[in-house]
């Protein structure tokens, strides 16, 4: 028996919503992992995070945050 067009539309909508929600949750998990890493960083006497850089002046954590934001900018 064929599916009613309204039911078909609802099923398609539900599938799209589920895929979007899964992607959103994965993005949240990635963001939480970055925040946990930041929380574990060394802090100075005032409680400010100390962000070190390599000899070339690059900071891996800041690069990863920038990459994350660029990837998930919608």
Image: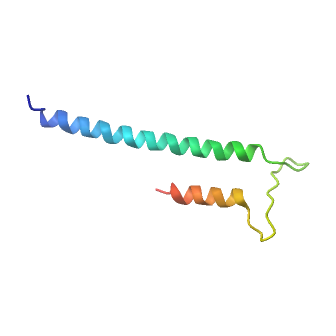
**x 18%, y 36%: residue:** 8
Query: Residue 15: x, y in percent?
Result: 31, 38
Q: Which residue in the rendered view is the most extreme toward the left?
A: 1
Q: Which residue in the rendered view is the most extreme toward the front?
A: 55
Q: Is residue 51 left or right of residue 31?
A: right
Query: Residue 14: x, y in percent?
Result: 30, 36
Q: Is residue 11 left or right of residue 54?
A: left
Q: Looking at the image, is 17 positioned above or below residue 46?
A: above
Query: Residue 56: x, y in percent?
Result: 77, 71
**x 69%, y 59%: residue:** 62
Q: Is residue 66 left or right of residue 52?
A: left
Query: Residue 57: x, y in percent?
Result: 77, 69
**x 37%, y 37%: residue:** 18
Residue 65's quadrant in the figure?
bottom right
Q: Which residue in the rendered view is the most extreme toward the top?
A: 1
Q: Looking at the image, is 57 positioned above or below residue 4?
A: below
Q: Which residue in the rendered view is the most extreme toward the right?
A: 45
Residue 35's quadrant in the figure?
top right
**x 73%, y 47%: residue:** 38
């Amino acid at each position: 028996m064929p599916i009613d067009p309204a039911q078909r539309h609802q099923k398609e909508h539900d599938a799209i919503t589920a895929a979007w929600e899964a992607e959103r949750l994965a993005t949240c998990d990635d963001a939480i992992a970055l925040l946990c890493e930041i929380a574990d960083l060394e802090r100075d006497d005032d409680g400010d995070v100390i962000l070190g850089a390599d000899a070339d002046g690059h900071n891996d954590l800041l690069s990863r945050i920038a990459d994350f934001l660029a990837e998930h900018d919608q």
